[in-house]
Image (cartoon, helix red, strand yellow):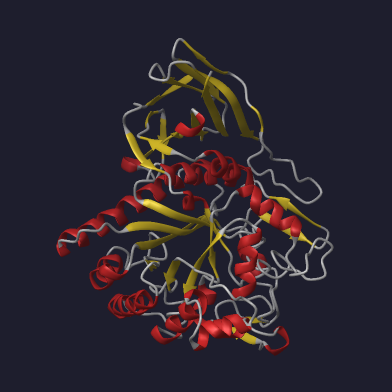
Amino acid sequence: MKKAELIIDRQFVLSEIDKRLYGSFVEHLGRCVYEGIYQPGHRTADEHGFRQDVAALVRDLNVPVVRYPGGNFVSGYHWEDGVGPKEKRPLRPDLAWRTIESNQFGLDEFMDWTKQTDTAPMMAVNLGSRGIEDAKHLIEYTNLPGGTYYSDLRKKNGHAAPHNIRLWCLGNEMDGPWQEGHKTADEYGRLAEETGKAMRLLDPSIKTVACGSSHFYMPTFGEWEYTVLSHCYDQVDYISMHQYFANRDNDSQTFLANSDLMDQFIEAVISVCDAVKAKRHAGKKINISFDEWNVWYHSGEQDKAIEPWSQHPPLLEDVYNFEDALLVASSLITLLRHADRVKIACLAQLVNVIAPIMTSDTGAWKQTIYHPFALISNHGRGHVLHTLVNSPVFESCHGRDGKSAYIDAVVVENDDEDALTIFAVNKSLTDDIELSCDLRQYEGYQVSRHVLLHHEDLKAVNTQTAPDTVAPQEGSGSSSDGGRLSVVLGKQSFHMIQLRKM
């Protein structure tokens, strides 16, 4: 049997984990909002129209922050259309997805929904078709207590207390030519600087996110980040990253190596951030908001058949399989291994649209990718240890020097619970691998739980009629004897191994 080793030291702490690493994303796109989180008249809907079957699944994911309302949608959005009496809200064309937006769900509804699902907002402002003035009005509406036009309008609309939104995205993917209001790096950098400045004058307590590159292969990547931050460094706290993964060639082994691409993308953005910091002799550090990431490719053909200018059509409804779940697990492990700089991340999206949760009029169910996200979100709290992995490798175009490791792993320590948690993926499609780790520094710790996610068929999916085809099960073959952990990681599998002080 092939062997791999984890090497950790209790004193070598990488970083505390920012719980916002387990965020998600709700955009006015397809059935994410309408028929997803909001469906008045549904048998589970409450008096606000919020589906309670969906809300329960969201709470179980333990998502601390949700980005809203876009996405590409925000670059043409007038937030005022979605507040006030619903019968007076206008129908508007959305150029991003060529649909009609009814505005029956808007800012105030979203804020009510966040409270019900135990999450917090990450609000985006429109810097595509709008700009500084609109951003000022929006933060006045959400964060000022009263006594001004827009704060009093919020009160008139039934929300006496301010929403106190603390985290703000300064636009979305402004480097993308597909974006309404696309800008050059200089244009966007200056706009982000002045918008951030105006918003902070209204509320100095907020944190802001500048738009980074839309993906790793953008022709402007690197130069975009450097130019944007050179303008707005003093007015922002994070820069965004977006990346989606696909397996269009049906090469599963190469597909699973995409976490290496994610790793290199993060390291490259950190380098640019620190280069600007050095150039400016800045005291503060810019961290990363990886606020769009997921697998996305399954729905490409079916989306072409959607008629334009309909309301909430079924767009981007990827049906995820087991290999997608393995890559989501590896991606989360990669984010944790960069927890010193990646402070926010958003799985895109939350419901129906490239999402872990799917709905129909008769129910809601968990896609395959729901399970690794839920396990890591709920148990990956505390601090990350520097985790070295000695693993067998395979040929890969995504890996450094053309090689990728079969084993992705990270170790998280939670002092409050006297717990040590190992998250590990075996990407080998043919071989079990024995993983060992010297834990003599953790005297008295024993394996208390071993959860396994595995299926023999990489293309296995969950459906409404078979929702548990891919689901967590009790793992076996793990032991901690004489201060040494040993566990057999079966081929194509994800594991969560918890040790507690006995």
For residue 185, side relative to residue 360 (left or right): left
The residue positioned farthest toward the top in the image shown = 482
Location of residue 143 in the rendering, given as x and y in whole percent from the top left corner: 48, 74
Picture quadrant where residue 37 is located: bottom right
10 or 493: which is nearer to us?
10
Does residue 370 lie above or below 109 as drawn?
above
Count of labels shown?
0
Picture quadrant where residue 119 is located: bottom right
Residue at 21%, 60% (x, y): give it: 277
Residue 22 shows up from this direction: yes
Residue 320 shows up from this direction: no
Does residue 172 lie above or below 146 as drawn?
above
168 or 294: which is nearer to us?
168
Picture quadrant where residue 349 is located: bottom right
Location of residue 146 in the rendering, given as x and y in whole percent from the top left corner: 51, 81
For residue 38, side relative to residue 454 (left or right): right
Residue at 50%, 31% (x, y): give it: 421
Location of residue 302 in the rendering, given as x and y in whole percent from the top left corner: 67, 66
Does residue 431 lie above or below 142 as drawn?
above
398 or 210: which is nearer to us?
210
Residue at 70%, 80% (x, y): give it: 310
The residue positioned farthest toward the front in the image shown = 147
Location of residue 215 in the rendering, given as x and y in whole percent from the top left corner: 41, 62
For residue 61, side relative to residue 23 (left or right): right
